[in-house]
Image (cartoon, helix red, strand yellow):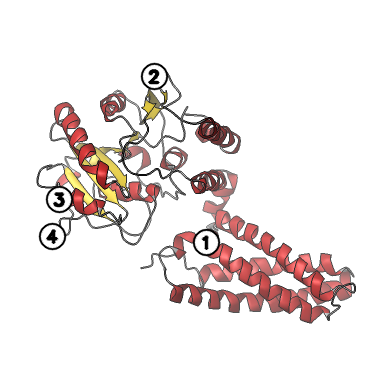
């Protein structure tokens, strides 16, 4: 077992979110076990012992000794990981990981799969809202030839127990939106929001995952080599212990995930791979820059327009540009380069990134002012059109240099 000898906790993998073709431990390379089931947790202390007990009894009967349960806990304040660790002597198939540098359900699942030793990889919630008894049915579908088997609320035998009208509307609305944005992925399953499924290791081996929020299934179907998909109906239960993790933030992350997958797996994604240029990241950078255009234009108008303060154009541009730079840094740090920012936590690191970003953008601002004056004085005597052209030129400069210096796309501690 790849564990820390002092506390029996699994070592947390680092680097890219990629599943290897073979288990990382040599002992299982030539004779891997059948099933590795990951249980991502956060503040599930009241549920964890119960679900480990239920899953162990089911799998001991169905595939005795040929499975493992991997709890991946995001450093729960209620010490879920500690309670799970105390169960290790009683459950020989149990393994526990405590993450302290990363957070999020999707990445927790992938980190768990990275240390898994099974030919089949699975995930189930730790709150007992997913019926454990369905595991055997999903496993049988994989053994019958499916690359992926998922539990669905929208096929025969499926449903929800007591959802409100609003929650039902949001769930269906999210599904319809997904079919519009990413029909090639969501059109293959009836319940793309499901977090209860199994997949063959070989179907996702080598694919670099880039999940947002909770919905790891989208990433598996979108980036893996998943041919045959099977589904089994289940009733989604209301939790009896702990608190729900569903918030408006999850719906926003879901939309972000759809857009990211659409960009990275579509034509732009193929172009990006061929020319080795991060097209998806550049598009996000461009969206942030577009928000900065409004900030820049608004401040430029307030400072330079003859009907307002009527300050000189160059001086007004410098001030409006600096305010737009600050706006853009906040959004880029939280979204465009969020994967890097999450690994460089703390105010010291953030201030360092901002200073680099500011210096680079000031150089871009000099370029911007130069282009603005050239266009305005020699080509197009309209300050706003000239400003848009100058912003476009500076955006390409800002993205490329910031990519290489401010947010380095490398493995960082």
Horizontal side, residue 99 vs residue 397: left or right: left
Mark 1 vs 4, N-terminal side: 4
Q: Residue at x 31, y 49 (%)?
A: 43
Q: CA distance from mark 1 to mark 2?
A: 41 Å
Is the Cβ of the residue at disc 1 closer than 8 Å to that at disc 4?
A: no
- Give the CA separation, mark 3 to mark 1: 37 Å
**Relative image position of residue 259 (x, y in whole percent):** 57, 46
Q: Depth-wise, is mark 1 or mark 4 nearer the camera? A: 1
Residue 320, image x, y percentages: 73, 73
| Tag 3 secondary structure | helix
Residue 131 coordinates in the image, percent (x, y): 30, 29
Earlier along the polypeptide chain: callout 4 or callout 3?
A: 4
- The residue where tag 2 is placed is 157
Give the residue number, with chain letter if any, for mark 4: 5
Q: Residue tagged by mark 3? A: 86
Label 1 vs label 4: CA separation?
36 Å
Confirm or deny contact between disc 3 and disc 2 (CB under 8 A): no
Q: Residue 359, located in which quarter of the rendered image?
A: bottom right
Q: Which mark is residue 334?
A: 1
| On-image quarter of the C terminus | bottom left
Q: Earlier in the sequence, mark 3 or mark 1?
A: 3
Q: Residues under labels 4 and 3: Cα distance?
A: 15 Å
Neighbour tally class for label 1: few under 14, some 14-19, many 20 plus, Cα within 10 Å:
some
Task: Check residue 314 in the rendering and tell me which mark sits there, or answer none.
Answer: none
Q: Residue farthest to the top?
A: 156
């Amino acid at each position: 077992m790849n564990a820390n000898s002092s506390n029996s906790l699994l070592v947390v993998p680092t680097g890219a979110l990629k599943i290897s073709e073979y288990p990382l431990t040599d002992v299982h390379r030539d004779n891997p076990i059948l099933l590795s089931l990951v249980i991502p947790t956060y503040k599930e202390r009241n549920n964890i012992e119960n679900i480990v007990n239920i899953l162990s009894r089911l799998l001991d009967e169905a595939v005795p000794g040929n499975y493992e349960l991997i709890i991946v806990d995001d450093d729960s304040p209620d010490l879920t990981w500690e309670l799970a660790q105390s169960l290790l002597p009683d459950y020989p198939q149990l393994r526990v990981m405590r993450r302290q540098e990363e957070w999020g359900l999707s990445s927790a699942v992938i980190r768990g799969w990275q240390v898994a030793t099974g030919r089949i990889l699975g995930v189930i919630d730790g709150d007992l809202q997913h019926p454990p008894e369905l595991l055997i049915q999903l496993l049988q579908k994989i053994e019958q030839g499916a690359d992926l088997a998922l539990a669905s609320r929208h096929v025969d035998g499926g449903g929800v127990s007591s959802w409100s009208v609003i929650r039902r509307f949001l769930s269906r609305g999210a599904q319809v939106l997904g079919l519009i944005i990413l029909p090639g992925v969501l059109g293959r399953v009836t319940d793309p929001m499901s977090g209860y499924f199994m997949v063959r290791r070989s179907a996702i081996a080598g694919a670099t995952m880039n999940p947002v929020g909770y919905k790891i299934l989208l990433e598996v179907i979108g980036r893996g080599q998943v041919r045959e998909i099977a589904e089994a109906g289940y009733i989604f239960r209301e939790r009896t212990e702990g608190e729900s993790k569903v918030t408006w933030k999850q719906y926003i992350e879901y939309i972000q995930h759809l857009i990211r997958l659409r960009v990275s797996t579509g034509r732009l994604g193929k172009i990006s791979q061929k020319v080795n240029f991060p097209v998806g990241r550049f598009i996000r950078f461009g969206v942030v820059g577009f928000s900065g255009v409004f900030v820049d234009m608004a401040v430029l108008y307030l400072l330079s327009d003859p009907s307002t303060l009527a300050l000189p154009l160059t001086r007004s541009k410098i001030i409006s540009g600096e305010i737009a730079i600050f706006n853009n840094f906040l959004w880029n740090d939280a979204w465009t380069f969020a994967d890097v920012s999450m690994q460089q936590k703390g105010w010291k690191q953030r201030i360092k990134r901002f200073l680099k970003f500011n210096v680079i953008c000031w150089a871009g601002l000099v370029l911007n002012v130069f282009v603005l004056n050239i266009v305005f004085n020699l080509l197009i005597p309209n300050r706003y059109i000239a400003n848009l052209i100058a912003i476009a030129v500076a955006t390409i400069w800002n993205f490329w240099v910031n990519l290489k210096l401010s947010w380095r796309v490398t493995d960082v501690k």
